[in-house]
């Protein structure tokens, strides 16, 4: 097995991983990087022979995971299977169109056009959570990842090998999404995990949200405006839920403006796919009805003088409405800019987080006099969360992607020493060869699995979640159908499931023995302790004369034909008893070789 990052190797952005497993090639995500030179914007797809790809899987709709997909399919010509979830299939084209239109406004070239986006996603095959999908000789199972609506982790299996790709995930539930979840004891051969926040350990999320809301309230009461740059598809719903909860508790009436466009479409999708939401969302009849929220144009916000909260995208202030509003609000000390997440180096958001007070934008210098608040409100797992998921999945090897080089260097020893799992952090284009054991995955029937002895795994230090149980070996009836193996109990039901019937073979062995040898052998049978006896007694004086008779010796039957000083012996037994210890001993005592 080989894992090669074509993007997001020792950095964040343009996620794309080539997985070579059991002679098959699977591409995991195909994203773009923002705020970087054009030559580093796309994954290193020149390293791949697109015609040899067996499958492409998209974990979620974010640009850094999906932004280069139309280039792969419509320009480079990949026309094979493409898997993603229903929410990703619905939302990703919208995100990509906005990205393309933003590039057009900046007069930047793009490698694909709007029509290619539609053509790309029309061919997608949608998968359900925990549904095992077969694509040729590859099977894929999707698991809930949290992070954003429709995001999944995927278990890829082929030829008895398995790889778990996390995409982006979070292990702490928020207001609109649940935490990532995996079944215990997957034990993949390799786990490819994101490490965006692998050196961060977060404190109470609720406390941080309360502190943020108090600062926002303080700014509003002083007559200022609050700009919150967010991803409009997902993060805007989360922030609205946080603010609405505080507004109700503090009895506030300030308006919450959300810039029209993507956020309105997001409302539709979040209602449509409410089953993907948190328990709070699933338990509400109107989970995304916000009494203080108004959808407005950027011009209306700029023209207004009323204190208000404004949610606008993009999240990193690298263009669009959020940057336009930032230019207008940043010079006023009454205002507040809240950056609620990670911003890539090179973006305006990253400069604002760094408390830069003079920012050059095009031909204009912006003096940042407003207050700036950075909130660690990330939808990525922190160090504890990543460690917990590794412990729970119990992989044989770990490959780190989607994280800064220095952060990975800090986290890698934690995986190796504390979790005791071999770990790698390859750069872009660097292949990791993973040693694998020859094995065949077999699906055990419930009857067989319930009878298996369960052995607990060794403990993992400093881990909240333990690995799953490891079953001891057991035997049964093996059924093969193409590349799928099933193991059933050796019973009538197991035979029926395998399309088999129990067959018995009757063995017959004829021989002639001296009467004295036969008499001594029969008289010694009682030593075996079984229910062994004869229909006719054989006395010590018996000389081998008289009528023919049978001896019922349990596992076998002896037909005896006296022949003067000898006996003609016919021994009968069934194949089902052939290996029983008693039978072997009986035949040995009678002088019969099997």
Image (cartoon, rainbow, N blue to C red):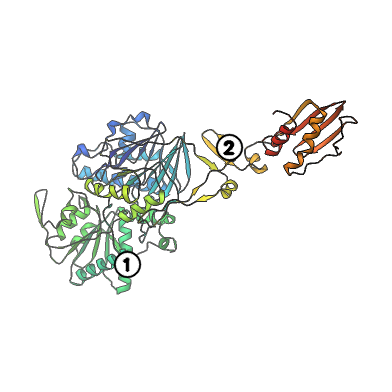
Q: Quadrant of the C terminus?
A: top right
Determine whether the residue tagged by mark 2 lies in a helix, strand or loop: strand
> Quick check: can you spot residue 262?
yes
**Horizontal and vertical percent for residue 465?**
40, 56
Determine whether the residue tagged by mark 1 lies in a helix, strand or loop: helix
Residue that extends furthest to the right in the rendered view of this protein: 546
Residue 258 is drawn in which quadrant?
Answer: bottom left
User: From mark 1 to mark 2, how far is it between C-alphas?
Assistant: 58 Å
Q: Quadrant of the N terminus?
A: top left
Q: Earlier in the sequence, mark 1 or mark 2?
A: 1
What residue would you read off at disc 2?
478
Using residue 302 as the reference point, say whether residue 519 is left or right of it. Answer: right
**Horizontal and vertical percent for residue 96?**
30, 44
Residue 158 is drawn in which quadrant?
Answer: top left
Out of 105 and 185, give the one closest to the viewer: 185
Residue that extends furthest to the front in the rendered view of this protein: 541
Residue drawn at x 32%, y 35% is 72
What residue would you read off at disc 1?
244
Residue drawn at x 44%, y 39% is 157
Marks 1 and 2: which is nearer the front?
A: 2
Above or below, 8 against 299 in this view is: above
Using residue 198 as the reference point, say whether residue 184 is left or right of it. Answer: right
**Horizontal and vertical percent for residue 291?**
34, 67
Out of 578 and 368, give the one closest to the viewer: 578
């Amino acid at each position: 097995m080989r894992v090669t990052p074509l993007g997001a190797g020792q950095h964040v952005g343009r996620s794309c991983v080539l997985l070579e497993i059991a002679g098959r090639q699977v591409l995991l995500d195909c994203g773009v990087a923002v705020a970087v030179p054009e030559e580093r914007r796309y994954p290193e797809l020149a390293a791949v022979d697109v015609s040899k790809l067996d499958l492409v899987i998209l974990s979620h709709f974010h640009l850094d995971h999906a932004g280069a997909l139309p280039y792969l399919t419509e320009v480079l010509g990949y026309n094979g299977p493409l898997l993603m979830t229903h929410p990703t299939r619905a939302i990703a084209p919208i995100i990509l169109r906005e990205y393309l239109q933003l590039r057009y406004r900046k007069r930047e070239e793009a490698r694909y056009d709007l029509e290619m986006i539609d053509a790309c996603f029309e061919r997608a095959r949608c998968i359900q959570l925990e549904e095992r999908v077969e694509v040729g000789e590859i099977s894929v199972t999707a698991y809930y990842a949290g992070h954003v609506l429709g995001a999944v982790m995927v278990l890829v299996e082929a030829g008895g090998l398995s790889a778990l790709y996390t995409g982006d995930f979070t292990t702490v539930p928020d207001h609109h999404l649940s935490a990532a979840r995996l079944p215990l004891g997957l034990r993949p051969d390799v786990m490819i995990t994101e490490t965006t926040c692998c050196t961060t350990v977060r404190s109470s999320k609720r406390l941080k949200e309360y502190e943020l809301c108090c600062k926002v309230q303080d700014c509003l009461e002083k007559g200022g405006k609050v700009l919150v740059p967010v991803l409009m598809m997902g993060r805007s719903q989360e922030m609205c839920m946080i603010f609405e909860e505080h507004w109700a508790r503090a009895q506030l009436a300030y308006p919450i403006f959300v810039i029209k466009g993507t956020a309105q479409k997001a409302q539709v999708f979040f209602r449509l796919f409410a089953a993907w939401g948190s328990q709070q969302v699933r338990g509400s009849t109107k989970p995304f009805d916000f009494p203080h929220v108004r959808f407005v144009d950027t011009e209306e916000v700029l023209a207004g003088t009323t204190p208000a909260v404004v949610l606008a995208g993009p999240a990193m202030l690298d263009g669009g409405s959020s940057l336009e509003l930032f230019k207008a609000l940043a010079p006023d000390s009454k205002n507040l800019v809240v950056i609620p997440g990670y911003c890539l180096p090179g973006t305006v958001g990253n400069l604002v987080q760094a408390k830069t007070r003079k920012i050059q934008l095009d031909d204009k210098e912006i003096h940042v006099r407003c207050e700036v608040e950075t909130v660690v409100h990330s939808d990525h797992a922190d160090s504890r969360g990543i460690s917990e998921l590794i412990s729970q999945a119990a992989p044989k090897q770990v490959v780190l992607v989607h994280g800064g080089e220095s952060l990975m260097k800090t986290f890698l020893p934690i995986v190796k020493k504390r979790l005791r799992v071999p770990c790698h952090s390859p750069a872009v284009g660097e292949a990791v060869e993973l040693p694998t054991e020859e094995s065949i995955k077999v699906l055990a029937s419930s009857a067989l699995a319930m009878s298996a002895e369960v052995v607990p795994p060794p403990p993992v230090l400093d881990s909240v979640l333990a690995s799953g149980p490891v079953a001891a070996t057991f035997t049964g009836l093996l059924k093969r159908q193409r590349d799928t193996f099933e193991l059933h109990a050796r019973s009538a039901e197991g035979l029926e499931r395998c399309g088999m019937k129990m067959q018995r073979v009757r063995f017959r062995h004829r021989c002639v023995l001296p009467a004295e040898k036969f008499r001594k052998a029969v008289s010694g049978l009682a030593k075996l302790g079984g229910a062994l006896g004869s229909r006719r007694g054989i006395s010590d004086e018996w000389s081998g004369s008289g009528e023919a008779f049978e001896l019922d010796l349990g596992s076998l039957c002896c037909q005896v034909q006296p022949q003067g000083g000898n006996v003609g012996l016919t021994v009968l037994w069934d194949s089902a008893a052939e290996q029983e210890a008693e039978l072997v001993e009986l035949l040995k005592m009678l002088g019969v070789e099997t």
